[in-house]
Amino acid sequence: MDTSVINERYSKLAEDSCCLSCGGAINFSDPKPGEVCVDLGCGRGNDVIRMAQIVGDKGLVYGLDISDGMIQKAQKNAAKLEVTNVSFIKSELESIKLPSGIADLIISNCTINHASDKTAVWNEIYRVLKKGGRFVISDIYSLEDVPDEYKNDPVAVSECWAGSVKKDVYLKIIADSGFSQVDILEESKPYVKGKIEISSFTIYGKKAACCSCKG
Ligand SMILES: C[S@@+](CC[C@H](N)C(=O)[O-])C[C@H]1O[C@@H](n2cnc3c(N)ncnc32)[C@H](O)[C@@H]1O
């Protein structure tokens, strides 16, 4: 998929104040002082800054995004608030520019639906988490199969609906990446977006703390 459309759309939205979230991942994430956290698709950096203020000087928060405009806006916002324990990196979620096993916590809000290779994204989440690390992710799923004409349309995908997959598909991708249990923390009623019905949910999972088993 051509990601330049996503970059362009979100670079324009970087200067807007509209809400781009689809759930309360940050409210469930519970970062702790000293932790290393990651926000996938960090947008303007608001959640990164919130986590950075909690993890403190001994912690660090990475914000990753594919959009140049969002990365610049996030850097400006952090500088304005004199928050220095943050690092904003331009990176696709399918190939996260971070070393393996560094994160205590990965959050994301309304971003993974945009990724054309969701299996790669979830394998990356598993790779980047430390053993015993956790994710809290808000995203959307579709209630019906997205017709091919929209699924492959970068504009429709950038509008947060055409890249969605059905809930059972979503949860299977996560299970296949190695997480043995996923808890649904909140879930919306179905609503229409674009040409289909979708729901949003916030999910939690943990990478097994032991060395040999996945989970
Ligand atoms: C709907 S916005 C959400 C932004 C932020 N999480 C929030 O809640 O305000 C989606 C964000 O994901 C980014 N994004 C979309 N696809 C991406 C990908 N494949 N890799 C990295 N970032 C991506 C966009 O640039 C955009 O900033």
Image (cartoon, grey):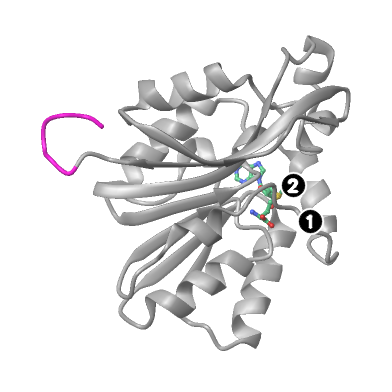
Give percent across and percent down for residue 109. Answer: 61, 49
Q: Nearer the viewer, residue 97 or 42?
A: 42
- State which region is magenta: 209-215
Instruction: Name the residue rendered at 44%, 67% in the picture.
Output: 61
Viewer can see residue 147: yes
Residue 18 point in image, percent of width and height? 83, 60
The amino acid at mark 2 is Asn
- Give coordinates of residue 153: x percent, y percent: 81, 23
Q: Kindly identify which residue carries mark 1.
A: 11
Q: Is label 1 in contact with label 2 (beta carbons under 8 Å)?
A: yes
Residue 94 as seen in the image, left or right of residue 42: left
Q: Identify the residue position indicated by label 2 in the image.
A: 7
Q: Residue at 60% across / 54% down in the picture?
A: 24
Q: Quadrant of the C terminus?
A: top left
The CB of the residue at mark 2 lies under 8 Å from ligand 1: yes
Q: Secondary structure at mark 1?
A: helix
